Each structure stands twice: as structure tokens, then as C-alpha cells.
Image: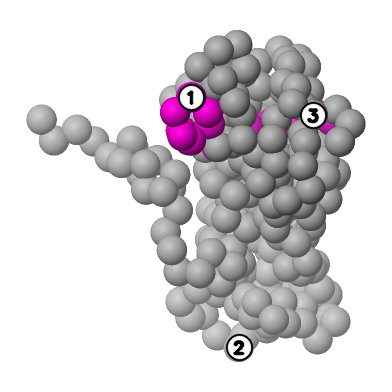
Amino acid sequence: MLGQPAYVLHTRAYRESSALVDFLTPQGRLRAVLRAARGKKGSLARPFIPLEAEFRGNSDLKSVSRLEPAGIPNLLSGEALFSGIYLNELLIRLLPAEDPHPVLFETYALTVAALAQGRPLEPLLRAFEWRLLDELGYGFALDIDSEGVPIASAGLYRLDNEKGLVPVGQLQPGVFHGADLLAMAEADWSAVGALAAAKRLMRQALAPHLGGKPLVSRELFMALKEPSRD
């Protein structure tokens, strides 16, 4: 297999001196054995570093034949680091193995770079979640309801994961205001309430595909934000 750009999503020890590594490439998510992982290659097998990689083998478990840096490492810390770990966990959990998604790969590369630059986290995370859902075929319109009618600013809607946004007649738990949905459609995060509504919407949209198993990165992030009780 020819060299291709890649990022490490996750690494764990494998046998005596090797590592089992999940990579994101334009050709999809690949799992490969990295031999001599305690050497130079192992130092590269960390998340958020742009890499050039070559893989051998036709099975689901490949071997890394070449691994080289291909750009400036994205140094993430604090909340940005947990956000990056969250993106990686989403990809491992939801992206089918060896299913090409070059647009999603490019979105990931840009998002990680933006996290390293210290840009606001919430808009970046919501945009990535939306792109991921769309690439996997789970996307839905934000400006048109399930009946093909334009979203009304004063309207109320609930998310049906099969149909999209369904109009409702009265305020009830879990519904969304039309004005917030229209702001999301335009990525207008200056609108009051739009970011909070987008977070709720993406959680509802992702939940059925995560199979009820909680995200470890989300739990770690919440623990980080909890005040110390010492």
C-alpha cells in the first residue's frame, strides 16, 4: 500500500515490544501492528501528529512498514486535549474500518490544528460532530422539517433520528426552538442559546449510534470540570 497521510487515534501495547495502533487515513480507519514500538516509530505513534504512513497486508489487521512525521505536531493541553481525545473516541466507535472518508479526514486535520491554535472549543466540536454524522449517512436538514416545510423561527421541533426535525405544537422536554436551529444552519454561534442547543441536538443525534455505551472521554472531561472537593 502506497504512503498516505495519517493520524494516530489510539495506541495500546501488543505482545513484547509492539503496539496495536488505530489510524485515521483518507482511506478510512485502519488497525495495524507497529513493531519495535519502543524505538523511533513508537515516539511518533501518538495522537495529533501529522504522519506519512505505509501499511502492509490485506487482512483487517495490517502492519506498519513506514511511519514518518509529515508536519508540525499539534500540541494540545487542558480542555483542548480532552476535546481531541473525544474526537478520536467518536471515530473509533462510529467509523467503520477501511471505509474511505477523505472529506472527514480533512475535517479532522483542520479541527485538530484549530484546537492546537486555541480557537473556541464548542463551535469546533459541533461542526465536527455534524460532519461525522453527515459522512456516515445520519445527517439531516437544519432548515427544513421532516415534512419538507422550512423551519419557522417561532416554531418548536423535536429530533426523530429516522425522519429528522418534526414540528411539535407545544413546549416539552427535549424540543428545539426554530430560531436556534436556523442559527445552527448558518453556523451563527453569536445567537444566544445556539451553541447550547447544538450540543443537545448533537448528543441526541449521536446517542443511537453509540449503542448506549458512555464515552470515556466525555466522563473524563466532566471529571476535569468538577470543582475540587479537597
Q: Is residue 178 left or right of residue 141?
A: left
Q: Position of residue 133 (x, y in %)?
A: 71, 60
Residue behind mark 1: 17
Q: Residue at x 46, y 34 (%)?
A: 15
At label 3, the amino acid type is Glu
Residue 169 is labelled as 2
Q: Position of residue 154 (x, y in %)?
A: 68, 72
Q: Residue at x 48, y 80 (%)?
A: 172
Question: Could you tell which of marks 1 and 3 lies nearer the N-terminus?
Answer: 1
Mark 2 or mark 3: whose residue is earlier in sequence = 3
Q: Nearer the viewer, residue 44 or 63?
A: 63
- Magenta segment: 4-19
The residue singled out by tag 3 in the image is: 54
Report helix, strand or loop for mark 2: loop
> In the displayed structure, would residue 51 be above or below residue 159?
above
Q: Amino acid at mark 2?
A: Gly
Q: Residues within 10 Å of mark 1 (few under 14, many from 20)?
A: few
Q: Residues within 10 Å of mark 2 (few under 14, many from 20)?
A: few
Secondary element under disc 3, as helix, strand or loop, is strand
Q: Residue at x 79, y 55 (%)?
A: 99
- Quadrant, the C terminus: top left
Lateral position of residue 5 relative to residue 112, left or right: right
- The Cα–Cα distance between marks 2 and 3, rounded to whole angstroms, is 55 Å
Residue at the image position 63 percent from the left and 49 percent from the top: 91
Rendered view: 221 above or below 215? above
